[in-house]
Image (cartoon, rainbow, N blue to C red):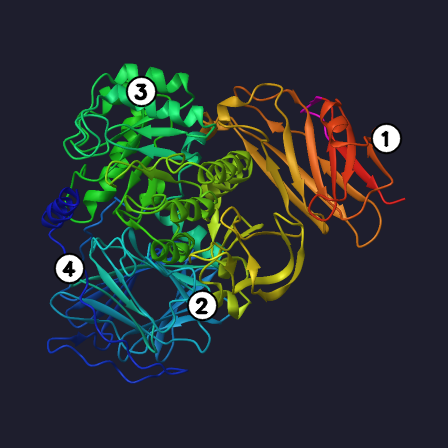
Amino acid sequence: MRTPRRLRAMALTALLGLTAALAGPQGAARAEPPGPAAPAAPDERTVGDLTGFSTAGAVFHLRAGETRARVTFVAADTVRVELAPDGTFTDPAGKDIVQPQGPPPATRWRERADRYEMSTPDLTLRAYKSPLRFALHRADGSRLWAETKGLTWTKDRTTQTLARGGDEQFYGAGMQNGRGNTSHRGKTVEVGVDYNWNDGGHPNSVPFYLSSAGYGVYRNTYAPGRYAFDDPVRASAQERRFDAYYVAGRSAKEVIGRYTKLTGKPFLPPLYGLEIGDSDCYLHNKNRGERRTLDALKVADGYTANDLPLGWMLVNDGYGCGYENLSEVNKGLGERKMKMGLWTEDGLAKLGEQVKAGQRVAKLDVAWVGEGYKFALDGCKDAYKGIEDNSDARGFTWAPESWSGAQRCGVQWSGDQKGSWEYIRWQIPTYAGATMSGLAYTTGDVDGIFGGSPQTYVRDLQWKAFLPAVMTMDGWAPSDKQPWRYGEPYTSINRKYLKLKESLLPYMYSYAAQATRTGVGPVRPLALEYPDDPKAASDAAKYEFLTGEYFLVAPVYEDKEVRDGIYLPKGKWTDYWTGRTYQGPTTVDGYRAPLDTLPLFVKAGANIPMWPGIRSYEDRTADSPVAWDVYPQGTSSFTVYEDDGVTRAHRSGAYAEQKLTVRAPESGDVTLSLGALKGDFRGKQTSRPYRFTVHTGAAPAAAVLDGRELPRLDTKDAFEKADQGWWYDPADRGGVVQVKTASRTTDRAFTLTLRAE
């Protein structure tokens, strides 16, 4: 069963013609530069003294003997530095990755005794003369980075050596299995395909890292590399040329945003792409006996019969599987509110006809169409484009090995793993860490594709319900791996979390829409939201993450019913299940987490939009409610994003947004102001009812909607039967006010006040 996967890795390695960067010892750490130089390779050369300088608008040319350097300001906050040791510039990546950036910024330069200074209104790059060394500063003179020695090269490697700040932290390098959501400081990370899909591997690498000093570096190349974040920092790539873009920002979010402005913003998945998917081979599967592609519908019926959500199915995930009767399979899945996907085992030549038959998801393993790391990126772009060229749907792809730019076209999937407690452990930091490289949608299979158990399946699915994209893969394990296969109590627990994932689609989709604008994905390390908290960058926060700004997820990764070491940063945090509150920063030990309980906390000030009671986003009708789960504290707001969920019409402005603002002083009334739903798209609700769950801990005296008191209901049953009204349940999570309105026009704002007296 494993042999085909090994063959895939061997075949792709041969195609790529690449190997992982050689591992080596880390240098000794020191607090401040200049530090001792690392031992030089026998043929290593360092750039010499500056011997020439000339300008051409926003481009500056420097010469050091036969070596040439070129500095190009592509934006006020972005500068490109190139070095050609033999005097000839090359660009293997061409236009593949870096996107058009518009007209160049205004620049100026001046010469000083020891250096040239090249500037935009935001940045100044210094080029020291003897020897040629670079340093980047903000306009106010504060330093972002500085080379401790000139750029060096050998016949097959170039290296930049930078001073490391006393408390400077580093993140990025793409998907780094088992790490990435805490700082890389003092560590070495590899960038490149290694086909190690377990702890320590680095699939879906990205030649980009960011620093807490306020900058990021994108190495413009297809060559593998290594970043050693010691003192000094040594960043190298396996090529005899240097080409790097530097982006500056006042926060890590700004740096990620400017990096993704350079290489492309993350795509916006269709709504079904944020639902769980199912992957298997339904033709000639040796592990399951003779089957036909239409048998996929029987498995789809299993989801329906067990009241389990499913957004899409890959119906041919297996070597030599093939497919048949695509139109019939697609029709049957559509009747079950599911989309059809295919694994591109045979490349992309048939993609157009497959899409016309109903394919809406493309999983890429061997569909590459280029050379080197370009294989994966071209496969992603071409499959994405193929879906869009042959339908009105959005491109939606999955890939196990990719590169910078892949955030524009697909989900990055961590490959083939075996379900176990260890598998859960190392995956937790992986996907939030990848967000620091602009990868907004990263994931792994529920309980892997091999091995696994009822307990590890449940525990893995629990926390992956808080990732934007996830699938369960079948066909490679000894037995089927759908979420009902282990029976009770596991089926009910899996249903609980998959339905919660469905209910939270408006929250997740709003963050997905944000990612297309900001570059910052929904799943986040604590360090991204709490950059001034040293524990957020440390191992204290390694096995937890944030979904959006408000959910803190601390998965259970051992065969235990108690979770220790849950770090809660600054703020008030509420246990999602019990309503117990904690004041951060604090570490929670002894958290009771039986098998059906994922440690999950919500930050005070959260206003979370939800679609209650659905098994598919297609369950919603014109009269379906929008529910808000509100944790009032101070003044806070959230803007929910809506569009048709499937087509590309949003790109031309067909979407709408609605903002909820909550004002909750320490004592007094709690006021919820819901703005009008602004914007338009096909299928937009012109009216709908609303529900609010407000975690107050005390009953209000009255609930007033636009100046009129709503009726108070005495029981939950009476509340559910009423068209509108409110009910306070002191036994629900520490005391919760439930409010519902009758259907209201969406183009008018309204205010709900919970009166204290």
The residue mark sitting in front, 1 or 4, is 1
Of labels 3 and 2, earlier in sequence is: 3
On the image, numbered disc 1 is attached to which residue? Answer: 709
Q: Main secondary structure of the magenta part?
A: loop
On the image, numbered disc 3 is attached to which residue? Answer: 358
Q: Which residue is at 86% across, 45% downward?
A: 756
On the image, numbered disc 4 is attached to which residue? Answer: 88
> Closest to the observer: 507 or 388?
507
The residue mark sitting in front, 4 or 3, is 3
Tag 2: amino acid: Asp
Could you tell me how far apart the alpha carbons at marks 1 and 4 are, in whole angstroms? 77 Å
Q: Which region shows up in magenta?
A: 743-749
Could you tell me how far apart the alpha carbons at marks 3 and 2 are, in whole angstroms? 45 Å
Could you tell me how far apart the alpha carbons at marks 4 and 3 are, in whole angstroms? 49 Å
Query: Residue 318: horizontal and vertical position, in percent?
Result: 20, 34
Residue 105 in view (yes/no):
no
* Up/down of 402 relative to 394, above or below: below
Residue 489 lies in the magenta stretch: no
Q: Which corner quadrant of the image does residue 190 belong to?
A: bottom left
Of labels 4 and 3, earlier in sequence is: 4
